[in-house]
Image: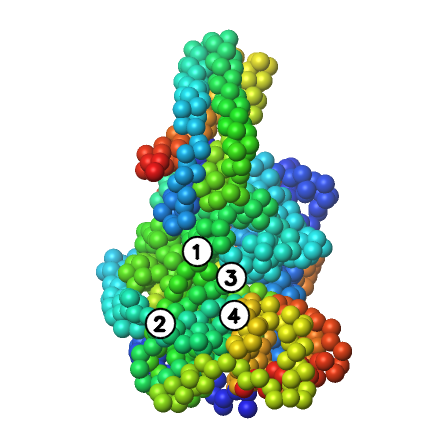
Amino acid sequence: MMFLVIGTEAVFFLSLIVAFVYYSLASGFNPQATQQLSLATTGAFSVLLLSSSFTFWRAEVSYQRGQVGGLKGWLLATMALGGIFLLGQGWEYWHLFVRDFTISKGIFSTSFYTLTGFHVLHLLIGLIMLGVVFWLAVLGDFDRPNSLVIPTAGIYWHFVDAVWVLVFTVVYLFPHILYKPS
Amino acid sequence: MEGNVYIPKPEEQLPSVDLEDSQGLLQWISSVDHKQIGILYLLMAVLYLLVGGLAALLIRTQLIVPENHFLSPQVYNQLFTMHGTTMIFFVLTPATLGFSVYMTPLMIGANEMAFPRLNAFGFWIAFFGGLLLYFSFLAGGAPDTGWFNYAPLNERAYASTPGVDYYCIGLLLGGIGTVGTAINLIVTILKMRMPGMQLRHLPVFVWMVLVTSFLILAAFPTLNAALSMLLLDRLWQAHFFAATAGGSALLWQHLFWAFGHPEVYILVLPAFGILSEVFQVYSRKPIFGYTFVVASGVAIALLAFGVWVHHMFATGQTNTFNAFFAASSMLIGIPTGVKVFNWLATLYGGSIRFTTSMLFALAFLVEFTIGGLSGVSFAVVPIDWQLTDTYYVVAHLHYVFVGGTLFGLLAGLFYWFPKLSGRMISERLGRWFFWLFTIGFNLTFFVQHFLGVIGLPRRVYTYPNLPYYGSLNLISTVGGFLMGAAVLFLLYILYQSIKRGEKAPDDPWDAYTLEWLTTSPPQLQNFGTVPPVRSFQPLRDLKQDLNKTKTA
Amino acid sequence: MLYSLAPPSIFDPASREADRLYALDVYFIVASLAVLLLVIGLLIYIVLKFRAQPGDEEPRQIGGNRKLEILMIGGPTVLVAIFFYLTVTTMRAVHPPAGNRSPDVVINGRQFWWEASYPGTAVTTANEIHLPVGRTLLLQLRAADVIHDWWVPTLGQKMDAIPGQSNHLWVTIKKPGIYDGVCSEFCGAQHAWMRIRVVAQPEAEYRRWLQERGQSARTPAGGTALTGAHIFKNATCGNCHRVRGTDASGNAGPDLTHFASRKTMLAGMLPNTKENVRKWLQNPQAVKPGALMPQFKYPKDSLNALVDYLVSLQ
């Protein structure tokens, strides 16, 4: 079931990415705008987010082995990493707002905020989901292995990370590589 | 081949979920039973049919004579927008989903859908999405930019009432419900079939529901993306679709039609499935070419994603670009043609019973062929360059949506009504309804082909007094009112049948699929035990086996 | 008379391009009628021959027939191939790329009227567009606000006018005459009254028309028309409307330099008469609700003078 969910969400993100690419090929696209993004900082936060896939994997392994303590610990780590990324995104947005890089500035900024914004939304939903799973673990629902809930939540969480890899590549890396500052 | 054969008796202890001895409004509202939710979807479709139909009659009244002043252009534009949006998203979609969630578990020998609460959620959020859309009338004006809501007309600068915002949000909510139900149906069909029922034993209707559900998952996100982007433009001054700020009006069209074209197949494939069942039962033959009928459904679904630009042939793309989509659009006509010929071949050599359901199915063959041919004419780009955006399109779309989908749904309604309600509909009344509706429908829309050919564009609140414009529009309006009367008559028939119809047996039509194994209506638990399966006609096989044991 | 005796039908081709399209239309009608009659014929036969009779046995249960299926796929495929060929050849014939050629007319779609300018001349007009007969013309289509669509059914295909984009159309008109068309993409409240009137003239007449329309507006000799000219200036009409030869140079509304030479007004909605002009100026929303012309309050005499001035702009 979760595969169907991420399948449909993947098409959604694909549509947004297609729109972004469409604009980057159209005239009027301002490559200077891409210089406003801080590749290094966001890159660092991205590493943290991708590590959360690793921590979730460890959580799942702990669960299969019946180590409920491990499950809870690694889940917390995953949520923490996701949360830090979220804060990092918020910090980046703040920095951009202050420099008048708003959603209505131009088509690059419009696409930027939309694509990253929807990713943030999905990440938030993922954090809530993990929170619920964590709480259920505390209540003892996962004392025995073989529930489908943990792997299902995992599919969604890995999806959120995978989408970020795609978004980061398309929005941050490609423009940086393709449009050298003149 | 194992499994006992057990046919439940009506006096079973479990409470039924029929319409007659209702368990109260609260029970219905809080139900997660797929049969009740199916009926709720059908009731929702009827409600919005009346509202959308009223809009249509107002439109036709305004158009009855040239230069009429019955409605102002502002009101007219809201009405035609709401008519289209309502009929597609809040009538045909829920009606289709209603039959899908009601019948799918029954046809695969399951007792429930995979996610009953998601099922209920999907219904209620779609229902409220529709209410929110209509609330716009009270909040400054309904959307008035057409059901496909092109940019930049849909931007705040040109559509300054909140109508378009309500359109976006109403459709987002409806879409969430639809996608949730599609996921539910896929998991149900893939995971909850009775033992022994392989995919090649699925009734054609269930196959079509499966294919349609995948279509929904792949098409709706594109619409959601477009709607979200438009809301950002309108509410936070983003620049997706405003040409003056570097945005692209055409991007809206690409995104919308990448959804919109698969959407029309979402609406028609399940109806094809219903008709496949109906043709078999009322001609007492199996579907001709089961594999080809199913495969053509899959082919249509795949091709559906490669044709969308045929809605944009007049936007100034290059000839090469257009030619590609012309080819794909012509190709998609082939699997559709295969289906029509297979249905005819099913009828051929059969023993045909002309029940009301079958009348709609037979009429469908003619109406949908007309609609399909006018559709293929648009694939011939130069013809499209003449006739797109005229009343010829209006004729085409109504022949496929009404003559195709709605006739299929009506065939399903008359076929399944005994199972849903436990009552039979009088064939005499049904026949009257059929003729009233079919004559009204053809009167309304056939002449519109001609109106398009003589230059009348669509979405005009009035037209000049050119030769034939007035007379053809008059005929069309008369037909429209006939259709309206027929629909009211249908509601009367349904009400009459529920109150005073003859009690229905479990299997009034001597049918072939498992929903007819249950009582009419089914008990809360659909099946106690289920029979062995070896073909896509499990009930027929069962009845044959029983006959053999009797005569043995 | 406001409109001709025949409706603007695609089966009444008046240009070479429309002739080509007409031929394709006929082929398609023949093919689709054949298919439809086949289906209807089969259905009638089936319905008559295979009706259920009381006491009927279950009929022979036939699952399918591979050969028949191939035929049912093959037949339509052949038709598709034929029509694909016809599609591509016809597209190439009636809509080759515009290339580097300069357009003969630039059409700008606006809410709710058509602006037409003739490159190389000073001529700008609205809604009634004159074209010469007998040679292949290139129309360029643009839009100032939302998407519109230019379509004259008897002259051939339609083409969208999209803001931010430049589209084109070719037309070779066969005979002089008046050819009516209409905006064919929903563009807002008055989409219905955004009609087109193409006046096709022999080359010599057309050149004369261009020359006349290229001249500035005549200044009224005196009387109420002259008073009207002053009112036009003071009431800021010139902020939206251009009248060449005066200070009025706005381009939000139609060019009025030769307003009175047009037979219709409001994009084909009404005949261009004094009475209609007066009604329009008095209360635009009562005449064409949703039009973007503001309502000015004139005292009665001023109104009449203004009307006299406008009617003098031949």
- Mark 2 sits on what residue? C103
Chain of the residue where label 2 is placed in the rendered structure: C
Q: Position of residue B472 (x, y in %)?
A: 54, 81
Q: CA distance from mark 4 to mark 1?
A: 20 Å
Q: Nearer the viewer, mark 2 or mark 1?
A: 2
Dots 4, 1 in contact, CB < 8 A: no
Q: Earlier in the sequence, mark 4 or mark 1?
A: 1
Q: Dot 4: within a 10 Å radius of its alpha carbon, few (fewer than 14), some, or many (20 or more) residues?
A: many
Tell me the quarter of the image containing the C terminus of chain C.
bottom right
Coloring applied to the structure: rainbow
Q: CA distance from mark 1 to mark 3?
A: 11 Å
Q: Quadrant of the N terminus of chain C?
A: bottom right
Q: Amino acid at mark 2?
A: Pro
The mark closer to the camera, 2 or 4, is: 2
Kindly identify the residue that appears in the image at 31 percent across and 79 percent down.
Answer: C136
Residue drawn at point x = 52 percent, y = 57 percent: B152
Tag 1, which chain?
Answer: B
Query: Disc 3 and disc 2: Cα gap in Å?
Result: 22 Å
Q: Is residue B263 above or below residue A33?
A: below
Residue beneath disc 3: C146
Which mark, residue B250?
1
Q: CA distance from mark 2 to mark 4?
A: 29 Å
